[in-house]
Amino acid sequence: MSKKLNLPIRPRRNRQNEAIRSLVRETALLPADLIYPLFIHDKEVDEAIDSMPGCKRWSLDGLLGEVGEARAAGVKAIVLFPAIADHLKTSDAKECFNPSGLVPRVVQAIKKSYPDIAVITDVALDPYNCDGHDGLVVEDEHGQPSIVNDETVHVLCQQALCHARAGADVISPSDMMDGRVGEIRAALDEAGFEDVLIMSYTAKYASAYYGPFRGALESAPKAGDKKTYQMDPANWREALREAELDVMEGADIIMVKPAGPYLDVIRALRETLELPMAAYQVSGEYLMIKSAAADGWIDEEAVMMESLLGIKRAGADMILTYFAKAAAQRLSASHTNL
Ligand code: PBG
């Protein structure tokens, strides 16, 4: 017979059953924490996206149906990403502020059907730019493409105004140009849109995890990479510097992207700043879970929930995730986090 240990402190007491575990649980994930990124295109039919199983490029009707389902499960915010027809892509990206373009039309339709859904729009030039970069491209003296900052910010302001006029609740610049938050804030305020929020991609890394997304929009850069504007994956202090600037320039919500591989950055910003913080579980993070589950290697639902809970635990208040609808449905059905 083995002897009882003299152990007054037994952490396992707090784990003995689900009722006790749910009392001591430190982090709660809610459907309202989730923001649903949705791809749209100017076609009558929905199209499956090869690089992102389970996601679609939605027609307007399909999109309204999908938003309705996500809303029924408790999701309260969506973010739109447009796939723009090739013939509309130009080097000045001017389709991005066309008042009858795809994004403004879709924003109006969603706000009409679901006035209580927060509509977030992405501000960056890559879907509209024939070069596939988030900013305007000019050739430098060596014939190398160079992404110009200040000229780009001017176009981003026009894009933001176009979205605000269509009824967007939140403008979300994902381009990583310097000074764009302050300039967009000033442009919105001057036009009377002082109630429109700015959710800034504060620390957006030059990440290989964006590959499947660029497949979805056919928006990969034609030449070069995004390393002169997106952040170096090796750096976290630089994220604090970007965040300080976003605070001074008037951002309402800051964001870290990707999420899972950058939990330390989420934690560092959480400990330093008061602003609400979003984290973006990007296409590559989604695809890794989807494809491992499709092959039967992992339990998709369990890993989906654990990945989201981990991002929340690290300090994110809200999470952009392609799992938003599925996770919200699971949360509203099970009344538990895991
Ligand atoms: C581009 C943009 C990207 C994503 C969101 N906005 C791609 C990029 O910067 O190349 C990536 C999202 C994802 O991978 O899920 N402005």
Image (cartoon, helix red, strand yellow):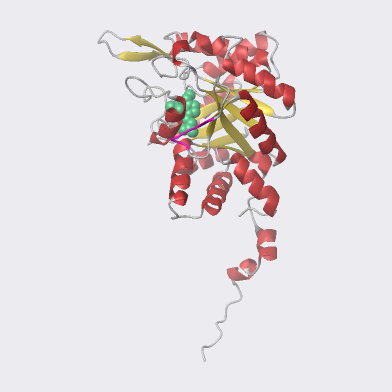
Q: Foreground: 24 or 117? A: 117
Q: Which residue is drawn at 62% across and 66% down?
A: 15
Residue 167 seen in the current view = yes
Residue 264 vs residue 153, the one in the foreground: 153
x and y percentages locating residue 68 in the rendered image: 69, 34
Determine the residue positioned at 48% across, 21% down: 175
Residue extending farthest to the bottom is 1
In the visual, does 335 lie left or right of 58?
Answer: right
- Residue 264 appears in the figure: no
Q: Position of residue 96 (x, y in %)?
A: 53, 13
For the record, the magenta segment spans 47-52
Q: Where's the C terminus, which quadrant?
A: bottom right
Q: Is residue 313 above or below residue 110?
A: below
**Quick check: is 179 in the magenta stretch?**
no
Position of residue 73 measured from the top left corner of the image (x, y, whole percent):
69, 42
| Horizontal relation, residue 206 to residue 33: left or right | left
Q: Nearer the viewer, residue 134 or 6?
A: 134
Tally the marks.
0
Q: Is the magenta stretch mostly helix, strand or loop?
A: loop
Question: What residue sits 69% from the left and 51% below the top?
Answer: 333
The foreground one among 192 and 239 is: 192
Vertically, is 34 above or below 241? below
